[in-house]
Each structure stands twice: as structure tokens, then as C-alpha cells.
């Protein structure tokens, strides 16, 4: 199952609303997770089951979608949110990741 | 506190071998499925291999099938990745990651800090 993400990169300002989309090549129900990765660090789980916020993750992060189309939204971008975001499908092996979306400062 | 600590990375020549380890603590290791994920320099995440909690079920990415072997020792709370016939394209940071589930859906909730494998002559 292939995952595509758009955009591949974006520039945004603190306080902006940011939306990243992930599309699967076939239906994956809600077996989708989102991760945040900062340079030199391991990925951090943000959302699983497409829309369930992982414990400890700020509520400005939200996810939606099912089937083939998914969205990660950051309602008000904070300085610590500048990072690369990956979607991941866990519907079946081989597990796959999207190519990533880099969010940097405008 | 859940911790995953990888070790065993380093510089190896093409065609060589390396064994990575992941030491787990802070949870009942034998109850969790585990995975290896890698990231080539400046690139995205690539899933490498999976092992069930008992070790009875194993999957590999096509890119490493026949060359890599995943295993675990639940008595030692450790996960391993034996890498043979290494190629330059295997150069990456290798992460171990715990697979968890909630609401009947899966996710990787804990990751190690990663260990760098460099394949070069």
C-alpha cells in the first residue's frame, strides 16, 4: 500500500492553521497514524486510528479521514511544531510511511 | 518508564555483516510486537522488519528479505537484527519501535534513539 503526502513542504508562521493530507493507494479503514520528527530525533507518535490523539500530545493537533484520504491539522502552529510529519499505514504488512511533509518557518 | 536502546551500529564494508540490538525496559517486553524501521541520511522512514511477541511470526521488507534476520530474546528483553550482505543502500539510522494497539488499531508508540549503520569501503 503506497502513501502519498501533500504538500511535500510548506512554510508557515506561528499561529497559522496547517493542514497536511495523506492518501493511500487502497482503502485502509482507519489504520493510519501520524508522527512528528525533528532533526536528529526519533519519530514521535501524534495520532493513531486516524483521529485519536496520543496521550500527552497537545490538542491543537487533530486527524481525520478513513478509507483512502486522511488529514492532519495543526490548529495554531507553535514554534515547537516546526518539524517533518509522516503518515503511516498499519492496515497490512509491509507497513508503509508517507514521504513526509516538512513544515518550516515562514 | 518505557525505554528502547539500540546498539551495534557502525562502519562496515559492502558485503559485510552487523548485528543490531535493542534493549527494552519499563514494560513487559514479551507482550509486545516489535519492529525495525530505518532512515537513510536526509530521507524518509522505511519499515524494515516485524516480529510477533512470541517470535513465531516475522515479516520483512522486500529490500532486506533474504539478507536480514529479526529475532528476539524475551528472557533478556532484547530485540535483534542480523544484517548480512550489506550494501551501500543499507546505510541508515536504524530504530527499534514498539507496536501497540488501542481501539483495535495499531501504532508505534515508543521508539529508540537509533543506531547509525554506514556501509562503505
Image: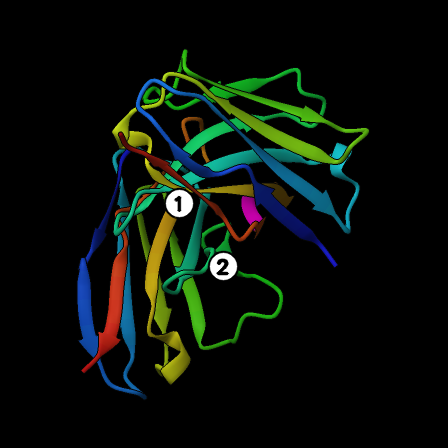
Q: Quadrant of the C terminus of chain B?
A: top left
Which SS class for mark 2? strand
Residue corresponding to mark 1: A88
In this rendering, position of residue B114 left or right of residue A74: right
Residue at 50%, 35% (x, y): give it.
B36
Residue corresponding to mark 2: A44
Return the residue nearer the eye: B95 or B7.
B7
Q: Quadrant of residue A91?
A: top left
Residue at 53%, 53% (x, y): give it.
B113
Highlighted range, magenta: B105-109
Q: Position of residue B77 (x, y in %)?
A: 75, 36
Q: Nearer the viewer, mark 1 or mark 2?
A: 2
Q: Position of residue B30 (x, y in %)?
A: 76, 32
C-beta proximity under 8 Å, tags 1 and 2: no
Q: Earlier in the sequence, mark 1 or mark 2?
A: 2
Which SS class for mark 1? strand
Question: Real-space Cα distance between discs 1 and 2?
Answer: 12 Å
Return the residue nearer the eye: A43 or A91.
A43
- Are labels 1 and 2 assigned to the same chain? yes
In this rendering, position of residue B3 left or right of residue B50: right
Q: Position of residue A52 (x, y in %)?
A: 53, 59
Residue at 69%, 34% (x, y): give it.
B78
In this rendering, position of residue B36 left or right of residue A101: right
Amino acid at each position: 500500500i503506497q502513501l502519498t503526502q501533500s504538500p511535500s513542504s510548506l512554510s508557515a508562521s506561528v499561529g497559522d492553521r496547517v493542514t497536511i493530507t495523506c492518501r493511500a493507494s487502497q482503502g485502509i479503514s482507519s489504520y493510519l497514524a501520524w508522527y512528528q520528527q525533528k532533526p536528529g530525533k526519533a519519530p514521535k507518535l501524534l495520532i493513531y486510528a486516524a483521529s485519536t490523539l496520543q496521550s500527552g500530545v497537545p490538542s491543537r493537533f487533530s486527524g481525520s479521514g478513513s478509507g483512502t484520504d486522511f488529514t492532519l491539522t495543526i490548529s495554531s502552529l507553535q514554534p515547537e511544531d516546526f518539524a517533518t510529519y509522516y503518515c503511516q499505514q498499519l492496515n497490512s504488512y509491509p507497513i508503509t510511511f508517507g514521504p513526509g511533509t516538512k513544515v518550516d518557518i515562514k | 518508564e518505557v525505554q528502547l536502546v539500540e546498539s551495534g551500529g557502525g562502519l562496515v564494508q559492502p558485503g559485510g555483516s552487523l548485528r543490531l540490538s535493542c534493549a527494552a525496559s519499563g514494560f513487559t517486553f514479551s507482550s509486545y510486537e516489535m519492529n525495525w524501521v530505518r532512515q537513510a541520511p536526509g530521507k524518509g522512514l522505511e519499515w524494515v522488519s516485524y516480529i510477533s511477541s512470541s517470535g513465531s511470526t516475522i515479516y520483512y521488507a522486500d529490500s532486506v528479505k533474504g539478507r536480514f534476520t529479526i529475532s528476539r530474546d524475551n528472557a533478556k528483553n532484547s530485540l535483534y537484527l542480523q544484517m548480512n550482505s550489506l550494501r551501500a543502500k543499507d546505510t541508515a539510522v536504524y530504530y527499534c519501535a514498539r507496536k501497540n494497539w488501542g481501539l483495535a488499531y495499531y501504532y508505534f508508540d515508543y521508539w529508540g534513539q537509533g543506531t547509525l549503520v554506514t556501509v562503505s569501503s
